[in-house]
Image (cartoon, coloured by chain):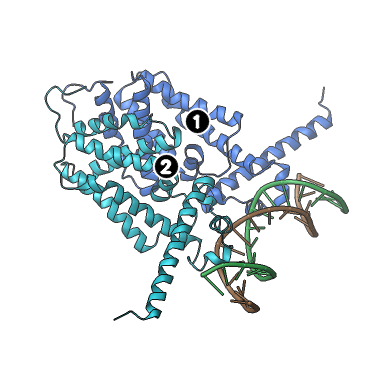
Chain colours: A blue, B cyan, C brown, D green
Amino acid sequence: MFESSETVTTDRRQLRRESTRSEILDEAWALCRDVGLAGLSMRELAKRVGLRAPSLYSYFDSKDAIYDAMFRQGYEQLRDHMGDYMGPQPVTRERLKEGVRHYVEFCVADTTRYQLLFQRTIPGFEPSAESYAVAVLALEDSSRALSAAGIEGDAALDMWTGLLSGLTAQQISNDPGGERWIRLLDDAIDMFLDHYGALPRKKGSRK
Amino acid sequence: MFESSETVTTDRRQLRRESTRSEILDEAWALCRDVGLAGLSMRELAKRVGLRAPSLYSYFDSKDAIYDAMFRQGYEQLRDHMGDYMGPQPVTRERLKEGVRHYVEFCVADTTRYQLLFQRTIPGFEPSAESYAVAVLALEDSSRALSAAGIEGDAALDMWTGLLSGLTAQQISNDPGGERWIRLLDDAIDMFLDHYGALPRKKGSRK
DNA sequence: GTCTATATCCAGATAGAC
DNA sequence: GTCTATCTGGATATAGAC
């Protein structure tokens, strides 16, 4: 009829444990935003959580394990963020532009997260196989969206990633908080689609 | 008739000093290529030069002063490398493509140098005013070349830097030593010039 | 689980003898 | 100029009491 009290206690402990883990991760993000990704230190992190440094090792095996959890969390956030834009809707120029704007919005919203997910900035860190699998899932989403737009071939795909990652990176590093390169996104997509002859414009819609 | 022996001695000492400084810088580059830009340490650097760590401070005031000298040296190398391509020759599509290929060649030839010059990867380092001035000189060269091609306006210039820095960065971080994105350079420049209506192609030269 | 205490290692930079 | 010795401060991680 009733669960044993031992089971209940265990569940509660697990919940509490997960809650603390989550709080540690939240503070890790905040700390990295303050001091940079590479500046994350176990001492300072513990201080912010209200623990002593060694206690963190009850929740994470190492500092890299914390980076790994952040990495995974970031890509889960990306999938959540892009969810609605990855459906099987008909693909038009406007839809594609909306999707890209939404994606870049995610990137510039948190430059620390951007660095962790998309750049190689931490000396020794490599994501674990499980976390990397989450990243691959998210990236497959976007390449599928491109195929739906009729853009095929490695060259076109590489050009696409080069162009958009270039504009995004310039925005983040040279005009953080601004719009200087974001403003160019729509035009860049037109330039790209015109060049590859995909999703033709309606007559007379140039400029 | 003869210079005083004191002056001669001073000159020789200065020469020797410059020679050692230069050797330290060479080893600093080599060390950074081995352990990453951020991994540069005064102890290890001294060991490679054949000195003890404190002796380095006779040649450079601090570790940042070494980064600063490297930064400056890198931009001087860039100007040297691009020298011939920045002259007042008539600008054609082919000339522009050659110049870009030459520039990207410089970037991918030494990814450590690329990171120091073009990315913000070292925690506390900011170039000094003098070194920054050298960087500005080099970058003005390229924007002048673009103007000569008839590409004017902030938007077009930002699109240009975004596109090319994007392809370069993808090349360096995702296919180091390869050609996957380098192959796309010519096509990217055609795409860009067509879109902005600069340096028109000869009739029927599309594809 | 959390703590104190500590092991171990590294860093940049300086003092002062020679 | 170069050295030895050291200062100061930081890091990750572990041992073992409670």
Q: Quadrant of residue B108?
A: top left
Helix, strand, or loop for circle 2? Answer: helix
Q: Position of residue B65 (x, y in %)?
A: 46, 62
Q: Between B200 and B179, which is closer to the camera in this rendering?
A: B179
**Chain at tag 1:** A
Q: Is residue B32 above or below residue B131?
A: above
Q: Position of residue B158 (x, y in %)?
A: 28, 43
Quarter the N terminus of chain B occupies: bottom left
Is any part of residue B125 visible from this angle?
no
x%, y% of residue A137?
51, 25
At label 2, which amino acid type do we have? Val
Of circles 2 and 1, the one toward us is 2
Q: Residue furthest front?
A: B1
**What is the chain letter for disc 2?**
A
Between residue A63 and residue B48, name the one nearer to us.
B48
Q: Residue at x 63, y 53 (%)?
A: A48
For numbered disc 1, what is the local secondary structure? helix
Q: For the point 59% across and 41% down, which residue is it?
A: A67
- The residue that mark 1 highlights is A80
Image quarter for residue A8?
Answer: top right
Left or right, A189 with respect to A1, comes to left
State whether residue A135 is above or below residue B53. Answer: above
**Residue A52 numbered mark, or none:** none
| Residue under label 2 | A108
- Are there few (<14), some (14-19), or many (20+) residues within 10 Å of tag 2? many
